[in-house]
Amino acid sequence: MEGFRGKECEICTGCGRCAPGGGEMRVITRSFLKPERGQGGEPRPGRGAFAAADVGTTTLAMELYDSAGNRMGVFSRPNPQAFFGADVISRIRAGANPLILGQMRSQVRGALEEGLAELCRGGEAAGELWIAANTTMVYLLMGYDPGELGTAPFSASRLESQSLEIGGVPARTLPGISAFVGGDITAGILACGMHRKKEITLLIDLGTNGELALGNGEKILACGTAAGPAFEGWREQGEEGRAFGSDLLGLLARLLREGRMDETGLLADPYFERGIRAGGVRLSQERIRALQTAKAAVAAGIRVLLEEYGITPGQVDQVYLAGGFGYFLDPAAAVATGLLPGSFLGRVRAAGNTALAGAWECGRREEAIREAEEICALVQTRNLARCPRFSQLFIEEMYFRPGP
């Protein structure tokens, strides 16, 4: 795809879309985490190639590996279920209709079959497929009625690892933790090694859904936040450019710094009525509000976990930002807009696709799935919707200002 050819931006974000090759959809399939020495485990004996998949609400990413766990190919595509809604709540509501539920099940299985066919086109056949996905995506993949996930008390009766077959290949999902903290977070914790460390680690996985996990080998707290599609970015009708949540936070930080937006998110004249064009989209007041509420939910969620864990932001040793959002996010912009506490600077690391990395771990070594099950037993979840403190902090975090 050639670079962005839309109207000239009114403020440069340095996104590179005006250069050749710019404007492409960025899907992170690789993880930047490596097994720790002495903790990686040995590859399974007597087995061949295997595949791993991250079935996200918006995007499906897959990789093929040889028997030693070396990557041989990658595949990604939009989740075809997006037709039924951009977020998990929309999918849960759509899944109440058995006919639509069957369609969504067939769609995602068809996408996985397509990925396997593409990855194995070179002649190397996958002997098994490991799937990391949030709880709703697992329910829809299996064809289970997702109704219980969307109604109080928001319980999930099918959190255990599920077995299925995709295109003739045996497949297995990673176990989930709760209705809104799924197997993708189990995979992320596994990939980060949080369950083995003494140091306090915070995993932040922001996409269409936002999940947080805080802790170490003794105790891990986790929660889901209502991030919505704000961090996934937008593509304007008829234009090639796309702005992502990470880009937009950088842009908002600059607007704050230059006085073109105040800390309440209000654009100054002359941008208040028409918005401001940058990175291939027009950033309107409405879009700022969408990002503002998503940012507030995540920042408040982080504060709730820190308070319930009994620590301050300065006591967090390592912060992992998972997925494409984390890879392209400028930590300084995240602090300037209040998404992250200021004391996190210098401790933030882009971890890549930790869901896919956890699925890879389960494919390459026998004991990893047992570790995943132990993680599910270790993690304690918090329902932010039932937390009065979250409501208070959410209002405080609606402001775009540096965190503590």
Image (cartoon, rainbow, N blue to C red):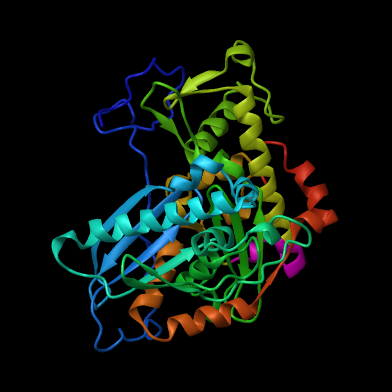
- Image coordinates of residue 397 in percent, x first then y, are 73, 43
Q: Judge whether residue 306 is colored magenta.
A: yes
- Image coordinates of residue 141 in percent, x first then y, are 49, 61
- The reply to whether residue 197 is visible in this rendering is no
Question: Residue sitting at 50 percent across and 52 percent down?
Answer: 104
- Left or right position of 336 against 130: right
- Residue, far left: 123
- Left or right position of 350 against 89: left
Which residue range is magenta in the image? Answer: 305-316
Quarter residue 243 falls in: top left
Q: In front here: 388 or 126?
A: 126
Quarter residue 351 falls in: bottom left
Question: Residue sitting at 47 percent across and 45 percent down?
Answer: 329
Q: Judge whether residue 343 is colored magenta.
A: no
Depicted 11 relative to depicted 165: above or below: above
- Image coordinates of residue 173 in percent, x first then y, are 47, 71
- Residue, far front: 99
Question: Residue sitting at 85 percent across and 54 percent down?
Answer: 388
- Image coordinates of residue 385 in percent, x first then y, are 77, 54
Question: Residue sitting at 26 percent across and 71 percent down?
Answer: 126
Depicted 176 relative to depicted 26: above or below: below
Q: In front here: 128 or 45?
A: 128
